[in-house]
């Protein structure tokens, strides 16, 4: 048996400092630090971290196949609610009931796992588009998708990544690679 010493650690460089959610740099004042990872195939669940708090993960046992969504107060950064919506065998109406009544300034964090789109309809795609998504219109079976949007945004969100499920480019047999996204989101100044 070998014990892991400093020379065997997984740190990128000795003494490398990590900030909230493992970001390499601190966020400016009045910004929220986040890191999120989509699920990998149908094996490893997604993760959503905000301000060094894990909002959703397999360890928290609050993720599932489909869309994993955390709603966050855009002023305080506090979690409002986190839920998983099965987009293969679930009822899309549950998702619609969850995202239709959002208040202005609510931040919406979305990480896919396995299949994000089979049950998605036009209304669902429009709601995500209204939250700032530019890729939701092209989302399909087993694609990987991570997205952060907000109720009341004027433009498309800069916080979105999408990888198509393609047998020519998939990293795993039948699934594209997992996506990882991190950044700093400006806090809302007032809640409506």
Image (cartoon, rainbow, N blue to C red):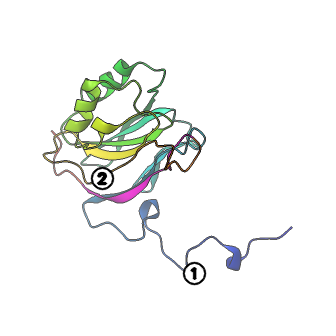
- Reply yes or no: does residue 88 show up in magenta: no
Mark with earlier residue (2, 1): 1
Residue closer to the observer: 118 or 63: 118
Residue at the image position 53 percent from the left and 42 percent from the top: 175
Q: Which mark is residue 22?
A: none
In front: mark 2 or mark 1?
2
Residue closer to the observer: 29 or 138: 138
Q: Are marks 2 and 1 in contact (CB under 8 Å)?
A: no
Residue at the image position 13 percent from the left and 45 percent from the top: 154
- Locate the C terminus by quadrant: top left
Binning the other alpha carbons within 10 Å of mark 1 as few (below 14), some (14 to 19) or many (20 upward) gives few
Binning the other alpha carbons within 10 Å of mark 2 as few (below 14), some (14 to 19) or many (20 upward) gives some
Q: Is residue 10 left or right of residue 119?
A: right
Q: Position of residue 10 (x, y in %)?
A: 62, 70
Q: Is residue 63 left or right of residue 74?
A: right
User: Which residue occupies the extreme left position in the image?
Assistant: 154
Q: Position of residue 186 (x, y in %)?
A: 23, 57
Q: Position of residue 172 (x, y in %)?
A: 58, 47
User: Which residue occupies the extreme front position in the image?
Assistant: 168
- Reply yes or no: does residue 177 show up in magenta: yes
Q: Quadrant of residue 33?
A: bottom left
Separation (CA) of disc 2 from disc 1: 30 Å
Q: Position of residue 104 (x, y in %)?
A: 18, 38
Q: Secondary structure at mark 2?
A: loop
Residue closer to the observer: 178 or 49: 178
Q: Which mark is residue 159?
A: 2
Q: Secondary structure at mark 1?
A: loop
Residue carrying label 1: 14
- Locate the N terminus by quadrant: bottom right
Q: Is residue 14 above or below residue 77?
A: below
Residue at the image position 24 percent from the left and 44 percent from the top: 134
Magenta residue span: 174-186
């Amino acid at each position: 048996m070998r014990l892991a010493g400093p020379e065997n650690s997984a740190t990128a460089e000795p003494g490398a400092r990590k900030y909230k959610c493992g970001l390499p740099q601190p966020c400016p004042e009045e910004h929220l630090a986040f890191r999120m990872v989509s699920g990998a195939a149908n094996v490893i669940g997604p993760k959503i971290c905000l301000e060094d708090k894990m909002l959703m993960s397999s360890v928290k046992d609050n993720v599932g196949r489909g869309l994993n969504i955390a709603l966050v107060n855009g002023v305080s950064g506090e979690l409002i609610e986190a839920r998983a919506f099965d987009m293969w065998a679930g009822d899309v109406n549950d998702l619609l009931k969850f995202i239709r009544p959002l208040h202005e300034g609510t931040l919406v964090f979305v990480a896919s796992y396995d299949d994000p789109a089979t049950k998605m309809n036009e209304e669902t795609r429009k709601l995500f588009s209204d939250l700032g998504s530019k890729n939701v219109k092209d989302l399909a079976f087993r694609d990987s998708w991570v997205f952060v949007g907000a109720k009341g945004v004027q433009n498309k969100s800069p916080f979105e990544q999408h990888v198509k499920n393609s047998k020519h480019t998939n990293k795993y047999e039948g699934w594209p690679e997992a996506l990882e996204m991190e950044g700093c989101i400006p806090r809302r100044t007032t809640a409506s």
